[in-house]
Each structure stands twice: as C-alpha cells, then as structure tokens.
Image (cartoon, rainbow, N blue to C red):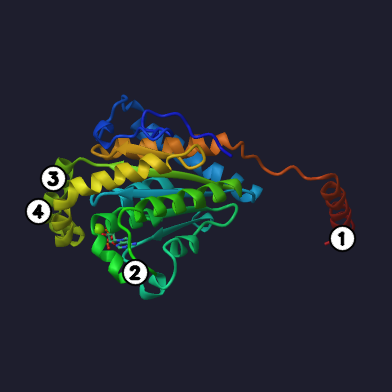
Amino acid sequence: MFEAPASPYLVPFDGTFKVSEASTVPVTNGQRHLGEFRKWARSNLKQSQRVLAAGDRHSVLLVFQAMDAAGKDSTIRAVMQGVDPSGCQVSEFKRPSDLEIDHDFLWRTSCRLPERGRIGIFNRSQYEEVLVVRVHPKILASQRLPGELNLETIWDDRLRSIREQEEHLARNGTVIIKFWLNVSKEQQKKRFLARLDDPDRNWKFEPQDVIERRYWDAYMRAYEEALKVTSKPWAPWYAIPADDKGYMRARVAEIIIESLQGIGLRYPEPSADDRARFAESRAELDSQTD
Ligand code: ATP
Ligand code: MG
C-alpha cells in the first residue's frame, strides 16, 4: 500500500478531524503555485501516468467532494491537463437514475472504478450517500431500502461499507486519494454573485444551489462525520483550502504527484524470457532484407 504524503491538510487517521479547524484559506505560503510549478506538475503527472500504464499493476482513484462553486470541475481540468486522455476517465455522479437506485448504493461508483494502469476521477462519489442524503434524509424514501429505516444507525453503516470497500480496493492495488475542496460560505456567496453578474457565467448559475446554501451547517456536520471515520492510511482525505483557486490546484497536484512517487512506479523490467524473445525478434528483423 502507498504512504499518504504528509501535508497540513491531511485529515488525521485517528478520528479527531474537526471542520471548524480546517482552513479555507492557505496556511502555507503559496510560492509553489505559480507558472513554473504548473509546468513541473504537468510534466511530472504526465510521466507518472505513462509509467502507471506501463506497469499495469496499480490503478489510481481520485475522489473530489465539495460544496457548490468550490471549484471541483476547474481543479480536475487544471490538474489533469497534459495527461494522456486515454489513460484516465472522469465520472460525474449526480442524482441517481432508476437503474442505479435498483442496486445497492456502492454499485454505480463500483462500475466506474479505474482499471489497472489507469487514473479514475470521481467528481462527486459514493460519499454523496452520507452527505446530501444525510442532510435530506427524505431522499431515503425513494431508495427502496428493505426493512425499517433506522436513522440512528444508517449513516454509520454506510460509512462502514465505504471504508471497508476502500480497504479492499487498496489491498488489491488501487491507490485512493480523496480531496475535500473546502470553500468558505462567504466565498461561495461571492462566486454565486459573480455567476449572476457575468453573462458568460450565467449558465453556471443554479437557483437550487442558493437554496441548498441554507443547509450549510448540516453539510459541514455531515462532512465532518464522513471525513473523520474514512480518512485512513490507505485512503486518506485531504481538506484543501478552496478560497484561493490557484493555491488549491497546486496543492492537489502536489499531493497526487507525491502519492504516485510513493508507490515507486517504474517501467517493468523485461524477464530473461522476454530478453530471449527480443533477441529472436531482432534476428528475425535482421534477416528480413526489406
Ligand atoms: P455542476 O453544478 O458544476 O454542473 P454538480 O456536481 O453540482 O456540478 P449538479 O447537476 O448541479 O452537478 O448537481 C448534482 C446534484 O446531485 C448535487 O446536488 C448532488 O448532491 C446530487 N447527488 C449526487 N449524488 C446523489 C445521490 N446519491 N443522491 C441524491 N443526490 C445526489
Ligand atoms: Mg451544481
């Protein structure tokens, strides 16, 4: 298993995480978030992904969760720029379809897990089942769950299912890194207003997002509960300050790069048999006159 890179934003593994202590603004100086860093990050990620594909042993799962307007989409875009598109896949998880509701709550994300050698990005994820659904438990009524609903136990049960699945995936070669892009309530308001003010950004404005903002505190409680019990050495959460987008993207890229370096990726060494076959092929090529 890989070692989660150290960071002031790493959510501790001992269940002591508090949203109130997670900063929405940078706590380290941001010198490494300028142009040069971006270039370095881009070429480094591109190279790591090539070796990941060549090795064909590990897969990488990046989970992004955040309140609206925190910058999930633009972070995913920025961080993955330059990476071979055929080696990665982005999956967005919105309100579940009828088919998805016909299965257990881990089914739809399981179907989208990355194959060995690939990077899979979840824009929202199975965590919505303990976030939006926890904030609005009436959603459970549409999930056709068997038996009596027990609101005292369902969230812990779901969190246990998520945690156990992640441990299973990690044991089998998936490197899981999870990011909570932690935007402040004030900054979110500014971004919503900017979407209303700027005609080119009107299309991003969603009236429901403003209604959802009323439930901010309930969301924070749900995030705290979820991150507390699911940040583990094999599937760490990072609570990245999201009020400064450039800084946020740089920290996300850095953590991904360091994680990939931590699993010691290298091009596969040809075996003695491979080498013998290469010699045969070389001799065959030499014997061909054209
Ligand atoms: P953007 O607004 O940038 O397009 P988004 O991820 O916010 O991206 P939307 O279509 O606005 O996409 O919202 C998707 C909605 O679906 C979110 O409010 C999210 O909480 C909700 N959602 C995701 N998963 C579930 C789920 N399992 N059950 C119920 N709602 C869910
Ligand atoms: Mg939205």
For the residues carrying marks 3 and 2, which lies nearer the camera in this image? 2
Mark 1: few/some/many CA within 10 Å (<14, 14-19, 20+): few
Whichever of callouts 3 and 2 sits on the residue coming sooner in the sequence is 2
Given the current orientation, which residue lies at the most extreme bottom position? 98
For the residues labelled 4 and 2, the Cα–Cα distance comes to: 38 Å
- Percent x, y for residue 14? 42, 32
Q: Is residue 108 above or below residue 39?
A: below
Comes first in the chain, label 4 or label 2 = 2
The residue where tag 1 is placed is: 288
Q: Are marks 1 and 3 in contact (CB under 8 Å)?
A: no
Q: CA distance from mark 2 to mark 1?
A: 65 Å
For mark 4, what is the residue?
Answer: 197
Q: Is 31 on the left or on the right of 184, as rendered?
A: right
Query: Where is mark 2, residue-wise?
Result: 143
Residue wearing tag 3: 190
> Residue at position x 28%, y 47% from top?
222
Q: Is mark 1 within 8 Å of ligand 1?
A: no
Are the residues at dot 3 and dot 4 in contact (C-beta closer than 8 Å)?
A: no
Closer to us: mark 3 or mark 4?
3
Q: Residue at x 27, y 31 (%)?
A: 21
| Residue at the farthest front position | 148
Badge 3: few (under 14), some or many (20 or more) residues near its Cα, within 10 Å? few
